[in-house]
Amino acid sequence: MALPTDPPPDKPARQPLYEASTQFKNWRFSPDQLAQTRGALNKAAVGAIQMTFETDEPGSSANVSFLGWEEEVTLVKLYISKIPQLCGHFRFPEEVEATAISYLKRFYLKNTVMDWHPKNVMLTALFLATKTTNHPISLEAYTTNIPRTAPSDVLDLEFLVSQSLNFEFTVWHAHRALWGIVLDVQSLQPPTDSAPIPSYPELYEQAIPHIHASRLTDAEFIYTPSQIALAAVALVEPDLASRWMEAKHVALNSKTALLSLQSTVEAIKAMITSSGSPPDVEAVREVDRRLRICKNPEKVVGSKAYLLKKAEEERKADEKRNKKAAEVQKAISDGDPFGESLGDASSGGLGLVDYDDDDDDD
């Protein structure tokens, strides 16, 4: 008689690749979390800059109009809109453009424009993106084609930008998800009373401008690339997008999930249409004018605060060098600075074998 056996254990659900990415784990936020992150960063920066002003000249910060975090976002948004222009000039592919924009946006979740102006950060983010997406360009060819830009403007910030990204260079993009969705909708059967489904190239070309517009918003921090891509399709073919969503969720037998996805798509559509355009140039000029006054003096080359900070950094570097030199000198005076000989039996070391002992013995 066969012995009873335990039922096989259930296989764990397969985790989607996107959910295993650093983007999903470290770069997704709710709208409230984004506001809190930016607000806290701005508050800390203003406090530190005020202290620097007051150290240099007591009372000097009283009449300074510091930027709010919303104004910082507006300034960064202007430089986001410059990246496609530069990519067009250099003929960089879509992947480079999208990656550079993500890098710039992520950088300013860890830093403030009052410390680092977006212009040079933008140039560095784009140059870094050419390397991480495997479309490299020489630094000389890059900087000589951008007016008033020296190689040092890019190189001086490259490590800081990489560090601010947590060295997480891979980005999952909505334009790639769009490719998959517009291909998949081709399998839908059109209703008899409706127009035929647009061809793959036609639908993609109609939807991709909305993907571009989404890059000027916070969509990539809040939603998944596939949700953004679906919203882009819904903006040009709403009935087709609805039918595709229904077809997917009928297979899963999940009405709740369908309603949730429809709500998400509507929220993304509203975000793209309301915020997916460059900011008003005059408003940005006013923000930039005020930034010249409230910028961190420690970042202004030649200022008193800058020179004091550099002197302090040099003092600490000298202390570190002197300490290391003293340690080496002490090791020399105490004995061999490279440690005791391996063959020094008196010190308990391992003796070396004399392989000549048996060579000539008869």
Image (tube, grey):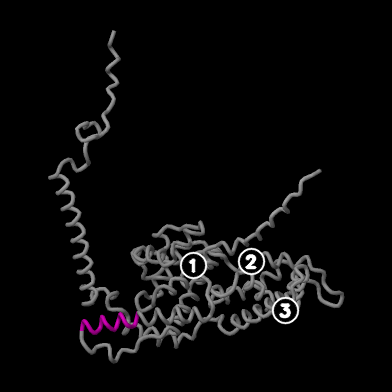
Mark number, residue 249? none
> Image point 42% across, 65% down: which residue?
145
Query: Is residue 54 shown in magenta?
Result: yes
Pick the front one: 324 or 344: 344
Assign a secondary structure to mark 2: helix
Assign a secondary structure to mark 3: helix
Q: Position of residue 135 (x, y in %)?
A: 50, 58
> Image point 49% across, 71% down: which residue?
83
Q: Quadrant of residue 340?
A: top left
Q: Is residue 92 visible?
A: no
Residue type, numbered disc 2 = Ala
Closer to the chain start, of discs 2 and 3, is 2
Closer to the chain start, of discs 1 and 2, is 1
Q: Position of residue 277 (x, y in %)?
A: 55, 81
> Image point 37% across, 75% down: which residue?
117
The answer to whether marks 1 and 2 mark residues whose Cβ atoms lie closer than 8 Å is no
Residue type, numbered disc 3 = Pro
Does 357 appear above or below 88? above
Mark number, residue 177? 2
Q: Is residue 94 left or right of residue 189?
A: left
Q: What residue occupies the far right of the structure in this picture?
A: 192
Spatial CA span between label 1 and label 2: 18 Å
Q: Assess disc 2: are there few (<14), some (14-19) or many (≥20) residues with their C-alpha within 10 Å of its C-alpha.
A: some
Assign a secondary structure to mark 1: helix
Residue located beneath label 1 in the image:
100
Overall secondary structure of the magenta stretch?
Answer: helix
Residue located beneath label 3 in the image:
238
